Amino acid sequence: MRKSHTVQIRPLHRAFFSRDPRRVARELLGKVLVREAPERLTARIVEVEAYLGEKDPASHTYAGNTARNSVLFGPPGHAYVYFIYGTHYCLNVSCEPEGQAGGVLFRGLEPLSGIEEMAQARGIEVRSTTDLPKLTSGPGRLSEAFGITRARDNACDLTSPASSLWIGEDRYRAQNVRVTPRIGITKAADKPLRYLLDGNPFVSGKGLQKRPGRVSIPQIRSK
């Protein structure tokens, strides 16, 4: 693994998230998730899924506003974290204007910095770049690598660098965007609401052609 030049990262504005989850999901590709910890963790977003609120049978908000899902009905740009299968947490971000539910699930990240800390959190050893997808390929893996839990992060403001978890952008521009049906669900499973960077080795799921290659690990700092 090699290190490239230091780049700046700027937080996304709340207006970015106050839109249709399909637009937000597509434009989140290439953005950066940041965990402010003793050692900063950063990773590029390479795979997400859109959930369309009360009109989407696969969404947690399909049955309406509850204590569990209320973050998705609140202001846009906040973290919605839930526990699944009794084993791992999943990170989402709220979309749409306040009062109108919608969200995007994070499915795959490409680690940029804090890799040793991610490996420790996952309880695995990274010996080469081929091991890196084990850190953050999949919603459960990425949450574990970033120490994301419902108690710690649910309702966290992802637009503020004062938060311990936030989303920003650098000079990277996503290319080769591919849209597929969502995976791991049974309701509305045919809807093309999964967005990913085609060929990226950190995309989760089977049946995708992943291009092997050298992974560049830049050092990212806030503006």
Image: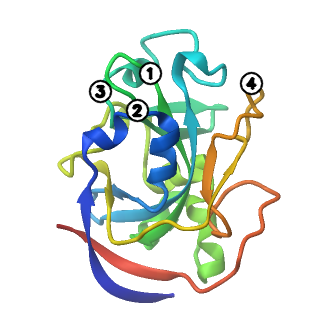
Q: Quadrant of residue 199?
A: bottom right
Q: CA distance from mark 2 to mark 1?
A: 7 Å
**Mark 2: which secondary structure?**
strand
Q: Earlier in the sequence, mark 1 or mark 3?
A: 3
Q: Quadrant of residue 5?
A: bottom left
Identity of the amino acid at label 3?
Answer: Pro
Q: Earlier in the sequence, mark 2 or mark 3?
A: 3
Q: CA distance from mark 2 to mark 3?
A: 7 Å
Q: Residues within 10 Å of mark 1 (few under 14, many from 20)?
A: many
**Mark 1: which secondary structure?**
loop
The reply to whether dot 2 and dot 3 touch (C-beta < 8 Å) is yes
The label number, if any, that marks residue 75 in the structure image? 3
Question: For this rendering, which residue is in front, 218 or 119?
Answer: 218
- Residue at (26%, 40%) from the top-left corner? 14
Reading the image, the residue beneath label 4 is 187
Does residue 163 sit above or below 56 in this rendering? below
Identity of the amino acid at label 2?
Answer: Ser
**Mark 4: which secondary structure?**
loop
Q: Position of residue 75 (x, y in %)?
A: 29, 26
Q: Residues within 10 Å of mark 3 (few under 14, many from 20)?
A: many
The answer to whether residue 123 is visible is: no
Reading the image, the residue beneath label 2 is 94
Q: CA distance from mark 4 to mark 2?
A: 20 Å
Q: CA distance from mark 3 to mark 4?
A: 26 Å
The reply to whether dot 2 and dot 1 touch (C-beta < 8 Å) is yes
Identity of the amino acid at label 4?
Answer: Lys
Q: Earlier in the sequence, mark 4 or mark 2?
A: 2
The reply to whether dot 4 and dot 2 touch (C-beta < 8 Å) is no
